[in-house]
Image (tube, helix red, strand yellow):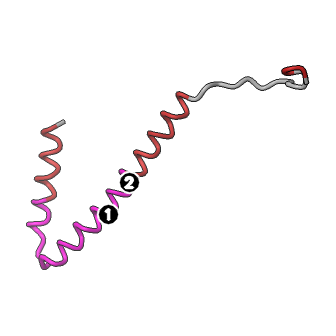
Amino acid sequence: MNSKIRQLEDDLVNILNASDVPIEVKRLVVGNVYHATEKAADNAILREKYEETMQNAPIEEKGDLTDAEGS
């Protein structure tokens, strides 16, 4: 996994270096990609927390509770 992470970083740097757009444009593009990636990561974490909560939630049986506790 570590080598995949390093390769991803190297690939991104190489793509940026190969582009002939000004450095300011590169900065803006990287910033936009960062924010989109951060949003996707935040959503993934929220989804994981929700799924974990649902897995640990007690299962409640539904039925007739009219006589429960002497009602």
How far from the left and from the top, in percent, is residue 10?
10, 53
Identify the residue shown where x is 44% and y is 39%: 48
Identify the residue shown where x is 11% and y is 60%: 13
Identify the residue shown where x is 14% and y is 52%: 9
Q: Quadrant of the N terminus?
A: top left
Q: Nearer the viewer, residue 51 or 65?
A: 65
Residue pointed to by mark 2? 40
Q: List the single residue furthest toward the front.
A: 70
Which secondary structure dominates the residues rendered in magenta?
Answer: helix
Q: Does the magenta stretch include residue 15?
A: yes
How far from the left and from the top, in percent, is residue 12?
16, 58
Residue type for callout 1? His
Range of magenta residues: 13-41
Q: Is mark 2 on a helix, strand or loop?
A: helix
Identify the residue shown where x is 12% and y is 76%: 23
Q: Quick one: label 2, few (<14), some, or many (20+) residues within 10 Å?
A: few
From the viewer's perspective, tell me whether residue 58 is left or right of residue 14: right
Count all numbered tags in the image, as a single digit.
2
In the image, residue 41 sits, relative to residue 52, either above or below, namely: below
Residue type for callout 2? Ala
How far from the left and from the top, in percent, is residue 30?
22, 66
How far from the left and from the top, in percent, is residue 56?
53, 27
C-beta proximity under 8 Å, tags 1 and 2? no
From the viewer's perspective, tell me whether residue 55 is left or right of residue 63: left
User: Can you tell which mark lies on residue 35?
Assistant: 1
In the image, residue 20 sits, relative to residue 16, either above or below, namely: below
